[in-house]
Image (cartoon, helix red, strand yellow):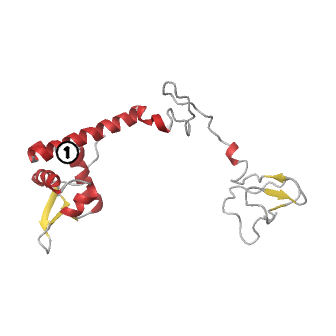
Amino acid sequence: KECFVARSHPLPHCERPLQWASAPRRIHAGDAGGGATRRGGGREPLANDPGRGAERRGRVPTRQCEAPLCGKSTRDGKPYCTEHVLLHPYAQSLVARLADQDRETERVRRQGEGAVNPQGLTAEEIVHFVWEHGERTLSQLSRDLHLETSVLECYLRVLVRRQQVTLTRDDRGGWVVSPGGTGRPRRAG
């Protein structure tokens, strides 16, 4: 049968043919696309209409936050509500890694390149960023990675010695950071 909802082309959201209950359905001018009506009457959603009724199919039952004394509903069956998401072990591991990265960056700021961990998160982030985005000037890379130029220079001296990045001068005498010759890096963990 012809789809009366759109005569000129099939509906883009139609995954299966429409199942006509009796008479063909039409959308009235006042209907905002939420459902279709039969000629002359009652509202009834189409079988494959993503609007009304779709939220009832495949719905995940609500789950309560596992934080003590919270009891709020969570989204998509997650164990914690948005206020307590940092109680999740994965979120805690990310926060711990970021704190380690901040401590390392502060150590490099105070002690210089001797404090650089070439296998640390910041060094890994620099190498991967240059491999993903290509050549960058020192100032561009500093802005992109939100690192002070002096701290970035310490990391780059170590990474150049390990041949993970190369430094060259551009036309204006500024430093350009490029991927090194040791091959594309692999992300740890």
The N terminus lies in quadrant: bottom right
Q: Secondary structure at mark 1?
A: helix
Residue under the image location 19 percent in, 45 percent down: 105
Relative horizontal placement of residue 122, taking residue 71 as reference (left or right): left
Q: Which of the pair 117/15 is nearer the observer? A: 117
Question: Residue extending furthest top?
Answer: 68
Kindly identify the amino acid type of the residue bearing the numbered disc 1: Thr
The C terminus lies in quadrant: top left
Q: Which of the pair 102/55 is nearer the observer? A: 102
Q: Quadrant of residue 57?
A: top right
Residue under the image location 67 percent in, 59 percent down: 13
Above or below residue 161? Residue 138 is below
Residue under the image location 69 percent in, 58 percent down: 14
Q: Position of residue 168 (x, y in %)?
A: 12, 66
Above or below residue 45? Residue 26 is below
Q: Which of the pair 75/53 is nearer the observer? A: 75
Rate crowding at label 1 as few (under 14), some (14 to 19) or many (20 or more) other CA atoms within 10 Å: many
Q: Position of residue 4 (x, y in %)?
A: 80, 65
Q: Quadrant of residue 106?
A: top left
Relative horizontal placement of residue 27, taking residue 170 as reference (left or right): right
Query: Mark 1 = which residue?
Result: 105
Asked if one can make out residue 181 in the rendered structure from this viewpoint, the answer is: no
Question: Residue extending furthest bottom?
Answer: 171
Q: Position of residue 125 (x, y in %)?
A: 26, 50
Q: Position of residue 26 (x, y in %)?
A: 82, 62
Asked if one can make out residue 179 in the rendered structure from this viewpoint, the answer is: yes
